[in-house]
Image (spheres, helix red, strand yellow):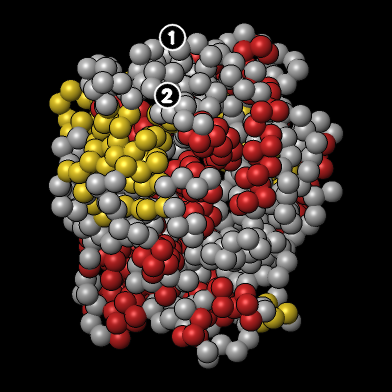
């Protein structure tokens, strides 16, 4: 209720307008959420800081690198690593109700290592960036209709990476510059003429 | 605002010794409206709701960001949402073979479903049998109005008198002029947003401030004008200017929260029955509410054959009770209302109360969801992202088929609902191939450049499409469940083909590049617009209710929800449900005062 939210003196709407006090009271606590960007992704952070919940340390390092190759940092925004994507994937797999995705990931990561040995004679993390990209390019070639196990794994890897990145703070605000989920005085857009 | 606290403060204790003026079964759009109108007339009303009282504001947390939620808004791992394939490959009951602790309908498969899992029913407790059907149910105070899609449209005489137009089915026992004043009342009392278009087949409401269109939507609107077709801003059952007479609701602030998750508005700008109708009804002092009360049977006076009350089960304790009333108003939702009538067997009504015609459960109709199309708007690629989702809906494309001309392949019509531009999650992230910085850039450049829409068409009311009671299967409380005998027919399939054709035609004409076109007709039930199981009519042999939704057989029994609709039209039914319920309850109160019930 409103009396619990005295710390919010005024809410900036649309850059310059303020909500009236009466509206504030009506909106109660929900107004606070929209204007303060709090919220640390605790689950992903825990995985990232301590030991992973599902992956081995080696697997985790592998996943962390794979996700960063899929969505890398660039001059526009940080990438999957900074957005703690591997940590989030690890947490969700650790609590998965079905055994199926866990097996898929475990076997998929083994395949990555096998392919890396086959293609470049060294482990994935020891190979050069160019070699890693060559490997990913190979397993990504049938992305829309995957057939081979490594192609299936790429699809799973990518879809979880995208899901985790674009729902993260970095993904939503820095990368996509999402403008919504805020209090507007007027609807945005064009009148129907 | 704490809804629960407000309701607790306002609610009187249920007195099972007294005889209420009316019992209303259900608390959704129809039940809420019945309670509002009857209490306004001074009648003492007991409302029975099968589900729980939920603190909706705490459930929805509308503006919480995905990363503030442990699972980014998804449900816990032991909860499962049924998929389209599961609905079609398997037969109901759908939760039987699932290993998951909780099984929910498909709407819980949408992003942010963790916020609505307590609103919809757990399929494990609520089985049904028969043909494939995606039945979405919300057993809680306010029912599905807590998460409804908010599209608020009127029907016209093209719908009420459809038989006169094409010879099929039955005309409604009312015409537009009978219901128009009540549409007006609903508009003014609850608030609706939109733009006047002066279309005879989609009458205008008394609109509050309209929602605006995004770039691509305006472009499509202008292109469609040349084809004599109309795209109008979403007509949302949302108050955009506020409602001076209702202290429980706020005006819309364009947070777009209602478009994420399974819907819902925790500031109650979007209409929901608890704040729009039930709390104001409680403020009259004439409404008593009992939740967790599953209506089991309408009780009948052996001497007169009239309704004398409702037997119900407490969902928490399993104990049975009876409440007495002079009038019984059923508003449990189209399918649950039919179920309750069929369950209410007595010597006076051996096939179920109000069912001398044998039509209860029959003429079951709804909306067919067919073609879904996505187009790329090339001039938006690479442009800075704009705020496109800060509104309770985007656009509605009004029916244009079979208005005056005749399509050679099918009768009746369909409309489209759609949206475009940037949203919180870029839907193209998984459909864009590749990886690395080129992939990342492409997702960003294209994310706001898509427009998509999906069609909703009229399913013809057919006697053979029906529900009855399963002779064996019971729900968690031992109540016989519904068995479905319901399939789309030839007219629906032909209509679906045309939806696909016209969707392509309109997008191409507007200059959009079609990137995705789904021809697949979604499973029966998908639209959540089930109607017709106790239809109105003038002939007691072929209809269940009269024009005031009063049983032909039992004059103190009314059924005021979508089950009374004679045909489905292609417009979303909620506004019509409420306008009809208001009209019928005015009549009910008048007859009650005159002692005719």
Q: Which residue is mark 2?
A: B555
Q: Is residue B188 left or right of residue B355?
A: right
Q: Quadrant of residue B251?
A: bottom right
Q: Is residue B444 left or right of residue B404?
A: left
What secondary structure is marked by label 2?
loop
The image shows residue A116, relative to residue B333, as above or below, that is below
Horizontal side, residue B480 vs residue B428: left or right: left
Circle 2 chain: B
**Residue at the image position 34 percent from the left and 80 percent from the top:** A42
Query: Which labelled disc corresponds to residue B541?
Result: 1
Q: Position of residue B483 (x, y in %)?
A: 27, 25
Question: In which quarter of the view is residue B410 placed?
Answer: top right
At 21% from the left and 48% from the top, the residue drawn is B314
Which sits earlier in the primary sequence, circle 1 or circle 2? 1
Tell me which residue sits at (58%, 20%) in the image.
B172
| Camera-nearest residue between B40 and B316 | B40
In the image, residue B177 above or below residue B138: above
């Amino acid at each position: 209720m409103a009396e619990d939210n005295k710390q919010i003196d005024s809410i900036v709407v649309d850059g310059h307008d303020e909500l009236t006090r009466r509206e504030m009271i009506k909106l109660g606590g929900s107004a606070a959420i929209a204007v303060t960007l709090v919220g640390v992704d605790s689950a992903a952070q825990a995985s990232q800081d301590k030991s992973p919940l599902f992956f081995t340390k080696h697997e985790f390092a592998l996943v962390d690198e794979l996700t960063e190759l899929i969505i890398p940092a660039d001059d526009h925004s940080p990438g999957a690593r900074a957005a703690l994507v591997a940590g989030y994937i690890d947490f969700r797999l650790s609590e998965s109700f079905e055994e199926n995705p866990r097996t898929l990931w475990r076997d998929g990561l083994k395949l990555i290592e096998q392919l890396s040995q086959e293609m470049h004679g060294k482990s994935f993390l020891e190979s050069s960036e160019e070699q890693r990209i060559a490997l990913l390019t190979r397993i990504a070639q049938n992305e829309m209709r995957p057939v081979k196990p490594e192609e299936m794994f790429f699809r799973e890897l990518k879809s979880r990476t995208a899901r985790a990145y674009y729902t993260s703070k970095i993904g939503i605000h820095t990368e996509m510059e999402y403008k919504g989920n805020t209090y507007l005085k007027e609807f945005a857009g064009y009148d129907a003429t | 605002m704490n809804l629960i606290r407000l309701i607790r403060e306002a609610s009187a204790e249920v007195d099972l010794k007294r005889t209420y003026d009316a019992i209303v079964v259900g608390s959704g759009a129809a039940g809420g409206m019945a309670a509002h109108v009857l209490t306004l007339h001074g009648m003492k009303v007991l409302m029975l709701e099968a589900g729980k009282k939920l603190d909706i504001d705490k459930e929805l947390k509308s503006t919480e960001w995905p990363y503030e939620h442990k699972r980014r808004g998804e449900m816990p791992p032991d909860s499962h949402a049924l998929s389209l394939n599961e609905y079609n490959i398997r037969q109901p009951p759908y939760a039987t073979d699932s290993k998951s602790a909780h099984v929910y309908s498909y709407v819980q498969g949408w992003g942010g479903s963790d916020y609505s899992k307590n609103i919809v029913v757990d399929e494990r407790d609520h089985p049904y049998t028969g043909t494939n059907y995606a039945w979405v149910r919300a057993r809680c105070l306010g029912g599905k109005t807590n998460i409804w899609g908010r599209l608020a449209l009127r029907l016209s005489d093209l719908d009420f008198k459809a038989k006169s137009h094409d010879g099929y089915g039955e005309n409604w026992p009312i015409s537009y002029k009978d219901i128009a004043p009540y549409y007006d009342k609903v508009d003014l009392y609850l608030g609706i947003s939109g733009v006047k278009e002066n279309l005879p087949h989609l009458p205008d409401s008394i609109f509050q401030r309209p929602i605006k269109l995004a770039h691509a939507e305006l472009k499509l609107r202008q292109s469609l004008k040349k084809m004599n077709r109309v795209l109008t801003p979403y007509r949302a059952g949302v108050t955009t200017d506020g409602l001076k007479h209702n202290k429980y609701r706020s005006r819309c602030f364009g947070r777009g929260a209602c478009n994420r998750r399974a819907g819902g508005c925790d500031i109650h700008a979007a209409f929901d029955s608890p704040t729009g109708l039930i709390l104001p009804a409680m403020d009259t002092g004439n409404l008593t509410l009992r939740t967790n009360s599953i209506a089991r049977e309408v009780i009948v006076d052996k001497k007169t054959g009239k309704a004398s009350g409702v037997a119900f089960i407490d969902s928490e304790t399993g104990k049975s009770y009876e409440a007495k009333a002079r009038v019984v108003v059923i508003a449990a939702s189209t399918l649950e209302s039919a179920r309750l009538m069929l369950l209410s067997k007595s010597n006076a009504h051996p096939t179920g109360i109000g069912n001398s015609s044998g039509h209860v459960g029959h003429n079951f109709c709804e909306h067919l969801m067919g073609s879904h199309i996505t187009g790329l708007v090339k001039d938006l690629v690479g442009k800075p992202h704009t705020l496109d989702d800060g509104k309770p809906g985007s656009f509605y494309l009004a029916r244009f088929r079979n208005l005056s001309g005749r399509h050679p392949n099918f009768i009746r019509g369909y409309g489209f609902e759609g949206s475009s531009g940037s949203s919180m999650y870029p839907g193209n992230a998984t459909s864009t191939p590749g990886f690395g910085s080129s992939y990342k850039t492409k997702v960003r450049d294209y994310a706001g450049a898509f427009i998509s829409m999906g069609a909703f068409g009229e399913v013809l009311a057919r006697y053979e499409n029906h529900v009855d009671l399963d002779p064996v299967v019971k729900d968690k409380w031992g109540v016989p469940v519904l068995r479905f005998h319901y399939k789309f027919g030839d007219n629906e399939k032909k209509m679906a083909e045309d939806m696909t054709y016209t969707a392509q035609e309109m997008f191409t004409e507007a200059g959009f590049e079609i990137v995705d076109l789904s021809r697949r007709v979604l499973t029966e039930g998908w639209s959540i617009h089930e109607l017709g199981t106790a239809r109105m009519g003038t002939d007691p042999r072929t209809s269940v209710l009269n024009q005031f939704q009063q049983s032909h057989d039992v004059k103190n029994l009314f059924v005021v929800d979508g089950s009374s609709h004679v045909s489905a039209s292609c417009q979303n039914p909620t506004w019509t449900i409420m306008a009809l319920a208001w009209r019928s309850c005015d009549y009910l109160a008048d007859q009650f005062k005159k002692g005719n019930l």
